[in-house]
Amino acid sequence: MATYRGEPIDLQPTDGMREEAQRGLDWREEYGRGGTAVGVAKARAILTEDELSPGKVVDMYAYFARHEVDKDGEGFEPDEDGYPSAGRIAWALWGGDPGQSWSTRKREEMMRIDDALDGARSATSAGREIKAVACSYKALDADRTFEGYGSVFGVVDSYGDVVMPGAFADTIRKAEGSGRMPAMLWQHDPSQVIGVWRSMREDARGLHVVGELADTQLGREAYALLKMGALSGLSIGYSVIGERYDRDADLRQLTEIELWETSLVTFPANTDARVAAVKDARSGSYRGLERILREAGFSRSEAKAVATAGMRALREAGAPDLTADEAAALCRRFNP
């Protein structure tokens, strides 16, 4: 039996789901329309896997929520012209009505497990969502202060969502007006506030944040873990205010988000994203990163420029930029 957060949960597809998935594949082959490669993969998983993963349950629930409107289109019902429509075929690939009912039930079971383990209703169940994102931290000169990105624009996550530029503008405006930023939590636990966000702003990459960890046991422990590379991501808790659906790409574009909190988390969405550089405020040393850069072939002046001031300083020194592969390899060496 599958498990969710260590608790057993039955995630075996029903016969009705399997019938719908097979029907969708047959229709798609016959009519040459309906669904995407993601939908085809989902149908095959329903047909071949003994149990689906919790992540696939969430994917299914999100798909049916987005595509409920397709039922209103011509050709969805057998007595309508154009049956089966492209929307009806896609619906079948994801398990059809049986899959919608099943994923809703299973999501509710997972939420009950969250409630039991966390001692409080999860953020998602209260109309809020949680999204982990690829992120790197860098400590600043002030002790226990660091910066990073709480969200990166234009990146499609595992739920088929992409955060759009401007999504946080209203949250930032309200926070600056009130003088109160969204909360900084530890692993999305509302009982563990570990610091404050000193600033938030949108730039070309995403939501840039600067935070200060509290001078408490948990805050000091979090900062120590951050410097070690044990913490490797940020995750946001939010409500969706504005969205639009890109039918061609089969994804949801989040155009306005009400940000409730941003947490330091152990696992980011992108498992390749790790801490690239952390400065100990007391020693002011970047020697570890500088050594790695020297071993990678950089000159002493170039390595020092990267280690102390980042890529902008490197470009100002006239050195060539790293390629994406080189940067990724460098980060893996620094934080394997």
Image (tube, rainbow, N blue to C red):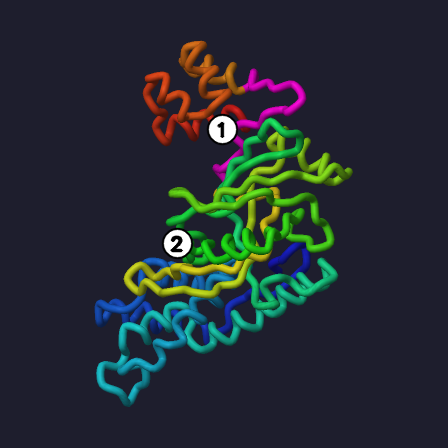
Cβ atoms under marks 2 and 1 closer than 8 Å: no
Task: Tell me the quadrant of the picture where the N terminus can be found.
Answer: bottom right
Q: In terms of depth relative to the viewer, which is nearer, 276 or 2?
A: 276
User: What is the quadrant of residue 178 in the picture?
Assistant: bottom right
Give SS at disc 2. Answer: loop
Relative side of 148 to 255, left or right: right
Q: Which of marks 2 and 1 is nearer the N terminus?
A: 2
Q: Give the range drawn in magenta.
A: 271-288
In the current view of this chain or complex, which residue is farthest to the front? 177
Where residue 134 sits in the image (x, y, percent)? 49, 42
Q: In terms of depth relative to the viewer, which is nearer, 84 or 331?
A: 331
134, above or below 129, in the image:
above
Relative side of 170 to 248, left or right: right
In the rendered picture of this protein, how many numbered marks are placed on residues? 2
Disc 2 to disc 1, C-alpha distance: 28 Å
Q: Name the residue located 41 percent from the left edge and 28 percent from the top edge.
A: 327
Would you name the residue on which mark 1 appears? 332
Would you name the residue on which mark 2 appears? 164
The answer to whether residue 252 is seen in the rendering is: yes
Q: Name the residue located 52 percent from the left edge and 70 percent from the top edge.
A: 103
Label 2 is placed on what type of residue?
Met
